[in-house]
Image (cartoon, rainbow, N blue to C red):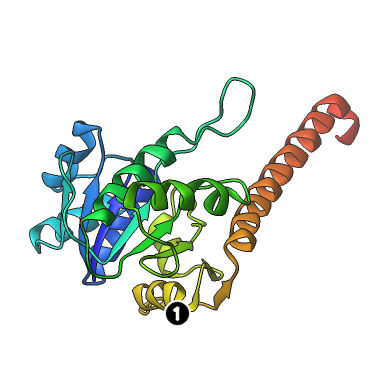
């Protein structure tokens, strides 16, 4: 399949390299020309074991390219842009909005069916109340009828992301409809892991719950460390 990936940070770069290694034609899209040039030279824009080699093979095989200019035709658009926190702690959707506006403009010119897949971390309800309205407004088309939408969160860990990509505990697909989910399942056909297909909002919540649980474990470990320091030599 032909895949456009929006955002060439950590998740986008790893996803692009792995999809290209699986034989898909991947175009990475980012406004940061440094990241684009790095990938087109066959290097990695982020530090991750094995990623530079994987990107280099993808570029050499012409399965992986990157651009900061106009997008090209594709079967799937995968959104991997960042969702940083605002000053008040709320989630910023400015990069999500910008990417989906561009995809919506692209959909307006496209006659064939296209799937939009959100991989960025967003609050439950974001795809249905924010992403889809932007796509429909800019494309003048209807989600679920003229184009598909899925939420496919990632569970990649820094330092082992390539292994995590190919050997995840599960792959979760939050699908707007079965046609959308079928395409994502086909995209990951080479990955041997349980495939969970569910509602879009459930997939969003699973990702948020996972992130919160990891943060909880880190906070607990830090508290135990502080307790050990307080106890000092009492354990000796």
Residue 116 seen: yes
> How many discs mark residues in the rendered view?
1
**Residue at 43% from the left image edge and 77% from the top image edge:** 179
Local SS, label 1: loop
Q: Which quadrant: the C terminus? A: top right
Q: Is residue 19 above or below residue 233?
A: below
Identify which residue, 137 or 155, lies in the foreground. Answer: 137
Of the pair 66 and 161, the residue shown nearer to us: 66
User: What percent of the width, then of the height, locates residue 70?
Assistant: 16, 44
Residue 162 sits in which quadrant? bottom left
Q: Is 59 placed left or right of 80 in the picture? A: left
In this picture, is 74 found above or below 217?
A: below
- Residue 35 coordinates in the image, percent (x, y): 23, 37
Q: Is residue 151 left or right of residue 100?
A: right
Residue 49 seen in the current view: no
Q: Residue at x 49, y 37 (%)?
A: 83
What residue would you read off at disc 1? 192
Q: Residue at x 44, y 55 (%)?
A: 118
Task: For the N terminus, give its image quadrant.
Answer: bottom left
Viewer-closest of 230 and 49: 49
The furthest residue to the right: 234
Q: Which one is nearer the viewer's eye here, 91 or 101?
A: 101
Q: Is residue 41 above or below residue 88?
A: below
Q: Residues within 10 Å of mark 1 (few under 14, many from 20)?
A: few
The answer to which quarter of the image holds residue 86 is top right
Q: Can you give x and y, in whole percent of width and height, for residue 229 in the image? A: 80, 27
Q: Residue furthest top?
A: 87
Q: Position of residue 106 (x, y in %)?
A: 24, 52
Query: Can you tell which quarter of the image residue 58 is in?
Result: bottom left
Give the residue drawn at x 16%, y 54%: 72
């Amino acid at each position: 399949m032909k895949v456009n990936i929006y955002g060439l940070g950590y998740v986008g770069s790893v996803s692009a390299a792995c999809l290209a290694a699986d034989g898909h034609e991947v175009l990475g899209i980012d406004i940061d020309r440094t990241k684009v040039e790095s990938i087109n030279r066959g290097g990695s824009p982020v530090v991750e074991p094995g990623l530079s080699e994987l990107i280099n093979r993808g570029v050499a095989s012409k399965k992986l390219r990157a651009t900061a200019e106009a997008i090209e035709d594709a079967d799937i658009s995968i959104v991997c842009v960042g969702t940083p926190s605002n000053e008040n702690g709320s989630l910023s959707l400015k990069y999500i909005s910008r990417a989906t506006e561009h995809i919506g403009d692209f959909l307006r010119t496209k006659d064939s069916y296209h799937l939009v897949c959100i991989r960025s971390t967003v609050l439950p309800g974001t795809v249905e109340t924010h992403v889809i309205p932007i796509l429909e407004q800019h494309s003048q088309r209807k989600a679920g009828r003229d184009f598909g939408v899925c939420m496919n969160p990632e569970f990649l860990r820094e330092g082992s992301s390539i292994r995590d990509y190919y050997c995840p505990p599960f792959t979760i697909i939050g699908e707007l409809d079965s046609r959308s989910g079928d395409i994502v399942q086909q995209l990951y056909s080479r990955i041997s892991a349980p495939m969970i297909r569910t509602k879009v909002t459930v997939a969003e919540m699973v990702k948020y719950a996972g992130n919160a649980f990891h943060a909880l474990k880190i906070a607990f470990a830090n508290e135990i460390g502080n307790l050990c320091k307080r106890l000092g030599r009492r354990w000796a």
